[in-house]
Image (cartoon, rainbow, N blue to C red):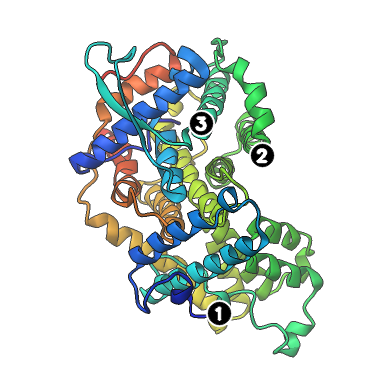
């Protein structure tokens, strides 16, 4: 499910630099908190959330330069912000469940290196952990029963991501963050299902979309989910990274959709 | 209520950007971490939040529904003015209050306790609003359509449907300004990121 929340190729150089430096900053935080194993969980999805929460909280950048495991030769810039402590934990949680999901789907027993960190995260962030655990369990149950309900499943995933977007329940913008996370989660789930549908059909595996769904139908569903996220975004007091967020929500998130459609033709 | 612009230290008609900036500056100043849970500061923060909402919701509403904003009069309001409303069940009143306080999940929960045969147009309307603002816009569509079916001609319901449509249309228009979606900037990373998930140990090296 990772890899959808990206900038499009039309994004200005400055925004790409910001996104990259925040990505490296989150990686840096993951390494600090969880060691090398933590770094393996890195994704752009939580980079997005890091910037979003930093913008709302007006959390200042702490800039740094380093050589790392991935870029051992060239020193590169990165920045962290105070919210990355939170988003790093959420990243580990998501990666853990991505692996559980992978093992479920593929009937494999790949070792979950994130597992040792989970009890502490579950204790500290009970609301988020419970939402993810419970909603994924419901999705997996639907999968097991072969229930093809893309709307219901995507909503379950969206609700879970919505909880993760809400770092602080008492924030005035908690309802907006929840709505935005839900819209983006629905989008990711639907696009992932659309992305996988040919492969799933070939391998005779579960896919939540009905087998005769058209491109127009899925596009309508995706627009509904994405516009839900942008509506919520407009209410929030964002002023640091707005063009970057908009690029992702209006354009970048759709990158894989086109690729898939091209493959169809 | 005092002038919301004044609360934020701005002149009437300040731009959305100015409003957001001013809000953030004040929110930092009156944050409990800074003020140490001082009740006067907490009260001030409430005023700042209300002023912000009043301006931003009005702006999004006026700018022909790019978002469907929180227009207070659009939901939950109007109690005590109509006999019909007076007869409304406690559950429906509670749901409206929850929506008004932006506790959308609680609203949905209390609505779910109303038996199916008692679900009227208003029930579907409240359910649509609560669903929409908690991120389930698909569910909101289906409920608001049901509400309109039960009470055709109700302007409040129609206006919520218009906002939902407005939000989708605005998105599509806005999206078209970006040109066709092609490859992402980090698309070179994607196969690696996927590998990353399947076989941890690989990194994005682009």
Q: Is A207 situated left or right of B190 in this image?
A: right
Kindly tell me whether residue A236 is visible in this rendering.
no
The residue depicted at 32 percent of the width and 28 percent of the height is A78
* Residue B64 place in picture, x, y as percent: 37, 74
Residue at which label 1 appears: B156
* Residue A41 place in picture, x, y as percent: 46, 22
Q: Nearer the viewer, residue A241 or A112?
A: A241
The residue depicted at 68 percent of the width and 35 percent of the height is A126
Label of residue A259 in the image: none
Location of the C terminus of chain B by quadrant is: top left
Query: How far apart are labels 1 and 3 at the CA level?
Result: 44 Å
Asked whether the residues under the numbered discs 1 and 3 touch, taking CB atoms below 8 Å apart as contact, a structural biologist would say: no
Query: How far apart are labels 1 and 2 at the CA level?
Result: 35 Å
Residue at which label 2 appears: A127
Parent chain of label 2: A
Residue at which label 3 appears: A85
Secondary structure beneath label 1: helix
Kindly tell me whether residue B169 is visible in this rendering.
yes
Label 1 crowding class (10 Å Cα cut-off): few <14, some 14-19, many 20+?
Answer: some
Location of the N terminus of chain B by quadrant is: bottom right
Mark 3 and mark 2 on one chain: yes
Parent chain of label 1: B
Q: Is A32 situated left or right of A215 in this image?
A: right
């Amino acid at each position: 499910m990772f890899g959808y929340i990206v900038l499009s190729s039309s994004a200005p150089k400055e925004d790409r630099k910001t996104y990259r430096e925040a990505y490296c900053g989150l990686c840096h935080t993951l390494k600090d908190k969880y060691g090398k194993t933590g770094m393996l969980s890195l994704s752009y999805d939580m980079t997005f959330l890091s910037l979003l929460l930093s913008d709302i909280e007006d959390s200042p950048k702490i800039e740094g330069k380093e050589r790392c495991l991935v870029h051992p030769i060239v020193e590169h810039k990165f920045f962290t912000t105070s919210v990355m402590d939170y988003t790093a934990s959420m990243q580990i949680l998501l990666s853990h469940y991505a692996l559980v999901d992978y093992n479920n789907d593929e009937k494999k027993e790949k070792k979950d290196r994130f597992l040792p960190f989970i009890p502490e995260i579950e204790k500290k962030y009970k609301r988020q952990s419970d939402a993810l655990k419970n909603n994924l369990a419901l999705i997996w149950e639907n999968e097991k029963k072969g229930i093809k309900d893309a709307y219901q499943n995507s909503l379950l995933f969206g609700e879970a991501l919505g909880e993760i977007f809400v770092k602080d329940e008492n924030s005035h913008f908690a309802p907006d963050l929840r709505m935005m996370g839900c819209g983006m989660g629905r989008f990711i789930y639907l696009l992932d299902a659309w992305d996988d549908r040919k492969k799933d059909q070939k391998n005779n595996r579960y896919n939540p979309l009905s087998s005769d769904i058209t491109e127009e139908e899925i596009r309508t569903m995706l627009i509904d989910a994405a516009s839900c996220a942008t509506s919520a975004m407009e209410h929030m007091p964002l002023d640091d990274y707005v063009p970057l967020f908009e690029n992702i929500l209006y354009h970048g998130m759709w990158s894989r959709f086109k690729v898939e459609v091209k493959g169809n033709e | 209520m005092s002038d919301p612009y004044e609360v934020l230290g701005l002149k009437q008609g300040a731009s959305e950007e100015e409003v957001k900036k001013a809000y953030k500056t004040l929110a930092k100043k009156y944050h409990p971490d800074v003020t140490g849970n001082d009740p006067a500061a907490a009260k001030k923060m409430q005023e700042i939040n209300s002023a912000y909402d009043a301006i931003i919701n009005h702006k999004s509403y006026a700018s022909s529904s790019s978002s469907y904003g929180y227009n207070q009069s659009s939901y939950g309001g109007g109690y005590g003015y109509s006999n019909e409303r007076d007869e409304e069940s406690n559950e429906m009143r509670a749901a409206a209050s929850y929506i008004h306080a932006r506790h959308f999940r609680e609203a949905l929960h209390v609505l779910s306790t109303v038996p199916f045969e008692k679900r009227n147009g208003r029930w579907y309307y409240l359910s649509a609003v609560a669903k929409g603002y908690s991120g389930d816009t698909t569910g909101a569509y289906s409920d608001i359509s049901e509400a309109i079916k039960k009470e055709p001609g109700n302007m409040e319901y129609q206006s919520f449907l218009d906002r939902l449509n407005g939000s989708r249309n605005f998105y599509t228009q806005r999206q078209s300004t970006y040109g066709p979606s092609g490859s992402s900037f980090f698309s070179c990373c994607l196969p690696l990121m996927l590998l990353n998930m399947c076989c941890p140990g690989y990194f994005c090296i682009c």
